[in-house]
Amino acid sequence: MTATTIVSRLRLKRPSIIPGFGMALGFTLTYLALIVLIPLGALVLRSSALGWSEFWALVQDPRVVAALKVSFGSALIAAAVNSVFGLLLAWVLVRYRFPGRGLIDSMVDLPFALPTAVAGIALSTLYAPNEWFGPYLEQWFGWKVAFTPSGIVVALIFIGLPFVVRTVQPVLADLDQELEEAAATLGAARWQTIFYVILPPLIPAILTGFALALARGIGEYGSVVFIAGNIPFVSEIAPLLIVVRLEEFNYAAATGVATVMLAISFVMLLVINLLQAWSRKRLGY
């Protein structure tokens, strides 16, 4: 046995600074398996009862395709909007002091605490054709919000905004303002300071907030069904279609749609996480 082998074995047996790693790891994996992996595995196993031909026919069903487009398209649009305005809101809360700042800061978390059904009813009350804002938006701008795909986007913006704000806010607070002062001293324009000094360290946080808002929007149900109108091929979301199939006792079709949503969501989040890792490695943050 060589000296190198002995040293490597001693390193492997060296105790950790924090005791209980084995127990903590075992508990973590067990908890993850019980809460996440086993239910998802059961979902995929249940949908496999369809058979490949039936599953493929389900995927190509026009109503399923339309519902998936509405769900994922609306979630993407809402997450993109939240990425922009969530960044602006985080910037205002971090960089400025003004009366009512604490109130606005606490209101950002309101969608977290508010039941989604209440949010849907409130949005429907505001944007329905015969309610507060609905008639004016349709009369002045020709924009009908309630009972259309636009209403879905509005609802997903409402419930997804806190994810971006709370993800970007601490990173923005930790940014050294001396870098901005140095850039201004060196003659950089304001837009150059924004794009070359401020935005690069914020990109991973923005991508994280985007991913969280997207994931929440894809699976959102309560705040959407009241304002969407739920018209097949127009404003029907995939989670609602799953509920419809369950009410028809067509469990195989319901699990099939859920499996398709799971696969698409996994691929999208994987791509976002890869982009996030690439941006951190490239930018050094």
Image (tube, rainbow, N blue to C red):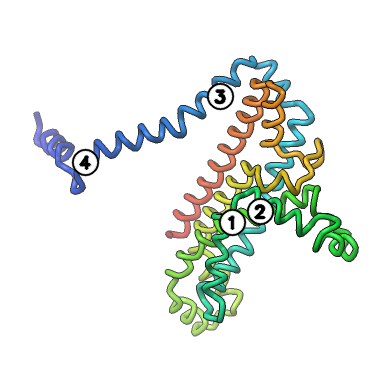
In three-dimensional space, the C-alpha distance between marks 3 and 2, rounded to whole angstroms, equals 32 Å
Q: Amino acid at mark 4?
A: Gly
Q: Earlier in the sequence, mark 4 or mark 1?
A: 4
> Which callout, 3 or 4, points at the residue further toward the start of the chain?
4
In the image, 147: left or right of 28? right
The amino acid marked with disc number 1 is: Pro
Q: Residue at x 64, y 16 (%)?
A: 50
Most foreground residue, 281 or 43: 43
Would you say the residues marked 3 and 1 are in contact, meaning their CB atoms lie under 8 Å apart?
Answer: no
Tag 3: amino acid: Val
Indicate the position of residue 83 as horizontal and vertical percent values: 61, 59
Q: Give the structural element (helix, strand or loop) at label 1.
A: helix
Q: Are marks 1 and 2 in contact (CB under 8 Å)?
A: yes
- Which circle's residue, 1 or 2, is located before the other in the chain? 1
Task: Mark 3 and mark 4 in contact? Answer it, CB < 8 Å.
Answer: no
**Which of disc 1 and disc 3 is earlier in sequence?**
3
Determine the secondary structure under disc 3: helix
Q: CA distance from mark 1 to mark 2?
A: 8 Å
Q: Residues within 10 Å of mark 1 (few under 14, many from 20)?
A: some
Which residue does the numbered mark 2 point to in the structure image? 119
Q: Is residue 269 left or right of residue 19?
A: right
Q: Is residue 271 above or below residue 97?
A: above
Identify whether 93 is placed above or below 270. Answer: below
Which residue does the numbered mark 3 point to in the structure image? 44
Which picture quadrant has residue 13? top left
Q: CA distance from mark 3 to mark 4?
A: 34 Å
As displayed, is residue 70 above or below residue 59? below
Q: Which residue is mark 1?
A: 111
Nearer to us in this view, 91 or 115: 115
Quick one: label 4, few (<14), some, or many (20+) residues within 10 Å? few
Q: Extreme right residue here?
A: 139
